[in-house]
Image (spheres, coloured by chain):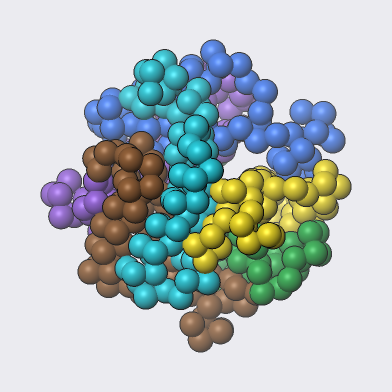
Chain colours: A green, B brown, C cyan, D purple, E yellow, F blue
Amino acid sequence: MPIVQVNMMAGRTDQQKESMIRKVTDAVMDAVSAPEQNVTVLINEIPKSEFGIGGQTAEKLGR
Amino acid sequence: MPIVQVNMMAGRTDQQKESMIRKVTDAVMDAVSAPEQNVTVLINEIPKSEFGIGGQTAEKLGR
Amino acid sequence: MPIVQVNMMAGRTDQQKESMIRKVTDAVMDAVSAPEQNVTVLINEIPKSEFGIGGQTAEKLGR
Amino acid sequence: MPIVQVNMMAGRTDQQKESMIRKVTDAVMDAVSAPEQNVTVLINEIPKSEFGIGGQTAEKLGR
Amino acid sequence: MPIVQVNMMAGRTDQQKESMIRKVTDAVMDAVSAPEQNVTVLINEIPKSEFGIGGQTAEKLGR
Amino acid sequence: MPIVQVNMMAGRTDQQKESMIRKVTDAVMDAVSAPEQNVTVLINEIPKSEFGIGGQTAEKLGR
């Protein structure tokens, strides 16, 4: 029953999120032989003003 | 000082969220004899396009 | 598919953990009408030297 | 590579979030001698209707 | 800078953990075109007595 | 009621953890004018075999 939380910067398309869920699920199944139905993936989109790298927001860094 | 994070699909009413916070708090108090004021419950609503079950989004699955 | 993470201080008995999982699951089922099999509860035990309240460890505070 | 997640009630200004990221990054660097570029801070803003203290939402408590 | 947290039942070998980190990193790189060095994967092993499925511990369920 | 989770590699001394809790608490108080007693800091130590950077474990990377 692996549960995966993906924290990433906001701004991805629905297609990218679908791809993330599909590919990460496959990776987890493959790594630990988990049945597909047991893998849960939760994406957490973080606004650039709330994502800090080296003390600055991603917004200020122009990411 | 138990801190509980509830990850669930978006779309619940305010009344359901209040009920979640009340009931989970009571459950935690009861299970480990924690004083009410020490229990914190954080709800994290996850959009259906970011909730993956068995490799597909909840949106695609029609959940 | 609610997924609940309970962060609490280390030192509980197995019986208390079982009770936590049972009672929190019931609370979640009740609050949002989720089927029992869809509720996952993960307990995260935190050592007292890694649990900070008001700037001090729970260990130093004698909790 | 410390990764810090700050869960706090929604409603802070961008300036407060920038200050949070700057100050928490400095604190982590200072505490464990981590290089600045290795410190990541993620802010998670929680609506008052989803933040439960002692069994009630922060909204109901007038926080 | 995607940061992935994998919560799974304790008891995996070091080789399986290495495989998990390698495969999940590749999946994330592929899904959102992230540079390899920017992907962080944190595994969180959860003892069977602290992993609840449908109200019972994984230990009791014989998982 | 800010709740801070610090994920970092295992191997720090108790003194470093105390310092982390003290300094991060002060940073949070300062950034959003939170009362000291309302700040909770949870440290999560991650073994090097479970911390992945760029697809490899911190153990393999010699961190």
- Percent of width and height locating residue A51: 49, 46
On the picture, is B6 further left or further right than E62?
left
Tell me the residue at 38%/47% (across/down): B31
Snapshot quadrant of residue D23: top left
Q: Total marks drawn?
A: 0
For the question of whether residue B22 can be seen, the reply is: yes
Q: Quadrant of the C terminus of chain E?
A: bottom right
Residue drawn at x 24%, y 28% as measured from the top left: F35
Horizontal side of E18 relative to B39 (left or right) equals: right
Question: Residue D56: percent from the left, percent from the top?
Answer: 21, 53
Question: Which residue occupies 39% across, 64% down?
Answer: C26
The reply to whether residue A55 is visible in this rendering is no
Q: Where's residue D7, x and y in %?
A: 39, 44
The foreground one among E21 and C63 is C63
Is F4 placed above or below A37 here? Answer: above
Outermost residue toward the top? F15
User: In the picture provided, is A26 more to the left or to the right than F40?
Assistant: right
Residue B16 rendering spot, x and y as whole percentages: 28, 69
**Can you name the residue that lies furthest to the bottom here?**
B62
The image shows residue B12, relative to residue E62, as above or below, that is below
Query: Which residue is found at the position 60% from the left and 73% from the top?
Result: B53
